[in-house]
Amino acid sequence: MRVLDRLEQLAAIGDRIGYSPEEDAAHELAAGWFREAGLEVEVDDAGNLLGRRPGDGRAVWTGSHLDTVPSGGRYDGALGVVAGLEAVERLGLPGLGVVVFRDEERGCAGSRARCDSRALPDAFLELHVEQGPRLLNADAPLGVVTAIVGYSRQTVTVTGRAGHAGTTPMAGRDDALCTAAERVLAIRDAAQRVPEAVATVGTLTVEPGGVNVIPGAVSFTVDVRAPDRARLDELLAAIGLQPGLGTEPAVMGPDVVAAARAAVEELGLPVVELPSGAGHDAGILASAGVPSGMLFVRSQNGGVSHNPDELSSPEDIALAVDALTGALRRLAS
Ligand code: GLV
Ligand code: MN
Ligand code: MN
């Protein structure tokens, strides 16, 4: 299948952190595919890539991102781009477009820049792997997303006193890493008390970072998510972070949801509606007023993602391309 072959070519580039030479290489590869498919190619000031069918027609876009987390999987983002191109080629309708947003993983820089400064589509439908186990548990290949959680990412710095690892008695130490470790566990416990909220400490920088030096300062990132603003702010406050910051939860556009539902039904598949616990460019476009939606493809291996074991089956991917094609057809007319 061409979609799988293209995913393979992207995976061969390796990790593709936003705005790295590797993400550039992935965008160049995709631009070549867009040109081969007869699409008009545009790169905007933020580096987002857009391939559009020439001619007048309702501007309906699909697509996703080609950057990755460090040591991620091969489907997150990339599937939405290659499957999106497949669907747009099949339909051949003027106005349809495939967009590749830059630097999604670290906070959707590309789609935010696009929403701040450039023309937006009449509707956006992003195909993505679920990155969780709900479709697997429901025995359903595809899902229709109803909303995307809100999230806030903040950095915490803890200070202590650096000193000699061999000569400073344990009793007199102010070890910043020990304090940070207690904060990390307190964050985990606080998140367990807010229903459907999650919090993750994903990076930690220890200074000065010597094998024989007591840590004098530690900075760590906290990624906090919840289905609504109230729970997001409740958790932020509970862990001593600033409430009110971050990306708002986003509700998907009713017409886009309806088109996705109808396309899944047309294939004789069950329609499973679910919220997304991951952030997505579709949430940024929805918050900017673009009617937006998402189709999810079942994730295998227990739903694992941001991990090399991320997997969706060729059969489910084939169904996803069919459903995306059907939904785009409905939205374009
Ligand atoms: C994007 O993958 C996110 O972190 O939700
Ligand atoms: Mn993604
Ligand atoms: Mn991701």
Image: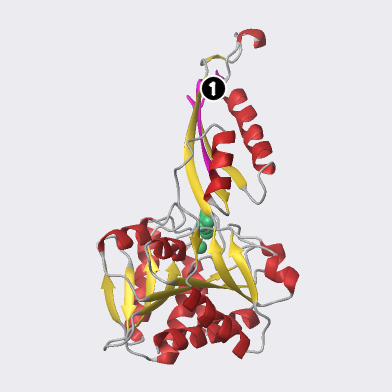
Quarter placement of the N terminus: bottom right
Q: Sort mark 1 into few (<14), some (14-19) or many (20+) by Cα contacts within 10 Å.
A: many
**Magenta span of residues:** 207-224
**Percent position (x, y) of residue 201?**
57, 40
**Percent position (x, y) of residue 289?**
38, 66
Position of 263 relative to 20 (above/below): below
Question: Which image quarter: residue 25?
Answer: bottom left
**Percent position (x, y) of residue 149?**
54, 56
Question: Which image quarter: residue 300?
Answer: bottom right
Q: Is residue 214 magenta?
A: yes
- Residue drawn at x 33%, y 65% as measured from the top left: 48
Q: Is there any visible trace of residue 318 in the rendered image?
A: no
User: Does the beta carbon of the residue at mark 1 sit less than 8 Å from ligand 1?
Assistant: no
Instruction: Identify the amino acid type marked 1.
Output: Pro
**Percent position (x, y) of residue 252?**
50, 68
Position of 12 relative to 153 (above/below): below
Q: Which residue is mark 1?
A: 215
Of residue 309 and residue 119, the one placed in the foreground of this image is: 119
Quarter placement of the C terminus: bottom left
- Residue drawn at x 72%, y 63% as measured from the top left: 302
Q: Is residue 154 magenta?
A: no
- Residue drawn at x 45%, y 47% as measured from the top left: 246
Q: Is there any visible trace of residue 41 in the rendered image?
A: yes
Position of 7 relative to 227 (above/below): below
